[in-house]
Amino acid sequence: MIRLRWLATALLPLLLLVGCSAPAPAPPQEGTGCVPGGPVAGGDVAFSHATNVRITGADGYRVLTVGEPYPGGPAQSVVLVGCGAPDPALPPELAGAPVVHTPVDGIHAYSTTQLPMITELGLLDRLTGVGALNLVADPAVRARVESGAAAEFAPGSTIDAEQVVAAAPPVLLSGGTDDPAFPALRAAGVGVVGWADYLESGPLGQAEWIKVMGALTGTDAAAATAFDRIEQRYAALAGRVRGAQPVPVVAGQPYQGSWNVPGAGSTAGRLFRDAGASWSGLGDPSAGTTPQTLESVLAADGDARVWLTDGPFATTADLASLDPRLTSFAAAGPGGRLWTRDRATTATGANPIFERGVLHPDEILADLVAILHPQLLPGHEFVYYRQVPAG
């Protein structure tokens, strides 16, 4: 509550300034917040996997709508207009919706999942801000921030609202949560876009949000092509596994007294299933996780000789320090294999699986296939997973 009161006090001058401002501003001039003469695609955007977002065409503009911008939050819409075009007359249902002129020439990215979508489209020069630098794994992005070309605007997960307003980015992409700073930022003219790729229930649904980045930056065709390639690689890998004998695995690890086992409809569950794994959550069609006790997971999955966990573990002996009962799993003993997904974690704790991996589930799937069915991917070079040595 102290933080909320402080933030409300800090933002009050911004709200008053906007509230007392004179008449609505004139249409933006070319070069202000958008790329003059840039390609502005119109019409609907086709999403084949993502269900939490839609982009529809209207008369002279497009509407970007996020169904659930944060868990339990109401739908939010943003109106996309061509650079230099006047703000359109909007129907009542869009009254108050932010208007963003595209292609935007600057992006404040709160979530690390947005960064590979920017770099994949060759738009690093349009990145103007990142949430927290210590969570960023991409060396090119880190170098841009460290050079001063982009700012860190939410260290410690607290948005520096005054800094953002002063920078005046045309869009700020949220981190998938609501934030008390957002009303003031919107009132100051910053186009806050609710970004909730993680609420998609499948890996390809999350990756398909690159099309949202394409709509904001005038790179619709490039975004669609990039996603098509990811989808094709993913489908080809899943096709290799189809028909192979499923490999029993232990999925996850206990945390604060509970073991959240992924359902078959969750993002992790779909990756495991497409990689040819079987586990106690395979019969649960839910898109989330189900809390279980360690004893129940041991009874259901204890004989599996492959364990896909989070870590961090230097050796298998570290399992006992987490909970001595974990050493009872077959995967922790002789002939077992313990794998963690922290192969490329940086010195600051940034893990690329939560950055590049969100856009490239094909790479995660390839790691999983190589773990479970190594004969299908001989010579595979692991990107995210590493085998924990015995200890």
Image (cartoon, rainbow, N blue to C red):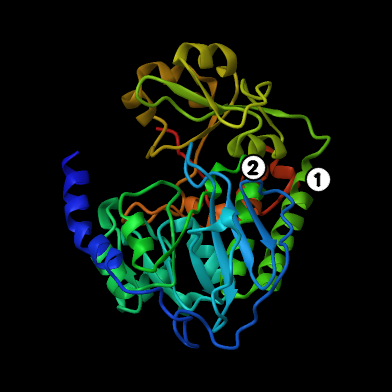
| Residue nearest the observer in this picture, 71 or 13 | 13
**Where residue 207 sits: x, y (%)?**
62, 54
**Where residue 41 sits: x, y (%)?**
68, 74
| Residue nearest the observer in this picture, 242 or 98 | 98
**Where residue 374 sits: x, y (%)?**
69, 43
Question: Which quadrant holds the N terminus?
Answer: top left
Camera sees residue 380? no
245 relative position to 367: left or right: right
Give neighbour class at mark 1: few <14, some 14-19, many 20+ (Cα, 10 Å).
few
Tag count: 2
Q: Which residue is painted at 26% across and 67% down in the image?
A: 20
Q: Which mark is residue 239?
A: 1
Rendered image quadrant of residue 78:
bottom right
Which of the two discs, 2 and 1, labels the residue nearer the N terminus?
2
Q: Which residue is painted at 78% across and 52% down in the image?
A: 236
Residue type, label 2 = Gly
170 relative position to 157: left or right: right
Residue type, label 1 = Gly
Q: Which mark is residue 312?
A: none
Camera sees residue 82? yes
Kindly state the secondary structure of the residue where label 2 is placed.
Answer: loop
| Residue nearest the observer in this picture, 272 or 382 | 272
**Residue that badge 2 annotates:** 202
Q: Does 34 sit above or below residue 382?
A: below
| Residue nearest the observer in this picture, 324 or 163 | 163
Kindly state the secondary structure of the residue where label 1 is placed.
Answer: helix
- Disc nearest the viewer among 2 and 1: 2
Q: Which residue is painted at 78% across and 30% down in the image?
A: 245
**CA gap, disc 2 to disc 1?**
17 Å
Marks 2 and 1 in Cβ contact (< 8 Å): no
**Where residue 17 sits: x, y (%)?**
24, 67
